[in-house]
Amino acid sequence: MRPIIIAANWKMNTLPSDAGELARQIAAATPDPGVIRVICPPSVSLAPVAAALAGTGVAVGAQNVHAEKSGAYTGEVSAAMVAAWATWAIVGHSERRRDQKESDELIGRKLLRCREAGLRPILCVGELLEEREAGRAVDTVRAQLQGALAVTIREGLGVPADLVVAYEPVWAIGTGRTARGADAAEMAGAIRDTVAALSDAATAAALPILYGGSVTSAAIDEFMAEPSIDGGLVGGASLKVDEMAGIVARAGLTAAARLEADAAGDEGATADPASGASR
Ligand code: PGA
């Protein structure tokens, strides 16, 4: 069974002086142990957020890592540096693809750096509005995955075993306009097919896929209702304690329901050997 994950992407918001307190409040308001919770503050706030979250069960993530291990890259932050506080990292966010012109090859190298530093990567993929309107959404996302994972495969890592993919249609980010659950589910299917072709069916089946783009406590249900979606990457709403409380609580209901369905399925298989079904 795949885990349910809610990751908060604070982007370039909060100050080191208030980030720890916000993280503490979110942790206190999201007590659900059935949901993996990750908070990704700006890199200068990793230390206070890590201190605030110690012992809460909420993990710390970085919003980015550099594609090189170390060296003459003024102003940049390496995976090993953020790993002093973080255990997760977002890579390939669409705002960085747009503003820093990050290529799939560069993003693939960031996945390598995450592995070396022991950071669990959340690889963001997603199409532009014009790509969706032209019927090229799936092709775009497939190419993004293939481009980044070609690097990890070439370097002998394969598809990283701990990889998480966040499907974030660019037109849904920060716009208040979400994708439809069915479209996100269709894309999740395409993502797993692509990963299966690059590795194997078991790796694809175990891959957690999150939806991102204007997720709120009111919008999350549409995505959690899709069995192929395993949580959310939350931007704007993740800065609001009440919103995070609602989102994690809603995701927790799905986590509990999936656990129950899984257990019932197992019992069913044992209780009814005559059915010939094997799980
Ligand atoms: P949003 O951002 O929730 O504000 O749309 C999501 C993201 O960019 O990860």
Image: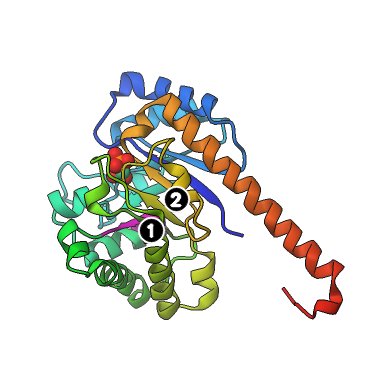
Q: Secondary structure at mark 2?
A: helix
Q: Which residues are magenta?
A: 113-126
State the separation of the CA atoms marked 2 and 1: 7 Å
Membership of 118 in magenta stretch: yes
- Describe residue 70's horizontal placement relative to residue 31 as left or right: left
Seen at 23% across and 41% down, the residue is 175
Quadrant into which the N terminus falls: bottom right
Q: Secondary structure at mark 1?
A: helix
Quarter holding residue 165: bottom left
Q: Kindly identify the amino acid type of the residue bearing the numbered disc 1.
A: Ala
Where does ligand 1 appear, by image quarter?
top left
Q: Which residue is mark 2?
A: 223
Q: In x, y percent, where is residue 190?
A: 38, 70
Quadrant into which the C terminus falls: bottom right
Q: Are marks 2 and 1 in contact (CB under 8 Å)?
A: yes
Q: Which residue is mark 1?
A: 184
Seen at 29% across and 49% down, the residue is 65
- Would you place residue 158 above or below residue 67 in this image? below
Q: In x, y percent, where is residue 50?
A: 45, 32
Seen at 48% across and 44% down, the residue is 221
Q: Kindly identify the amino acid type of the residue bearing the numbered disc 2.
A: Phe
- From the viewer's side, name the closer residue of 154 and 182: 182
Quarter holding residue 266: bottom right
- Describe residue 167's horizontal placement relative to residue 120 as left or right: left
Q: Is residue 66 visible?
A: yes
Seen at 38% across and 26% down, the residue is 240
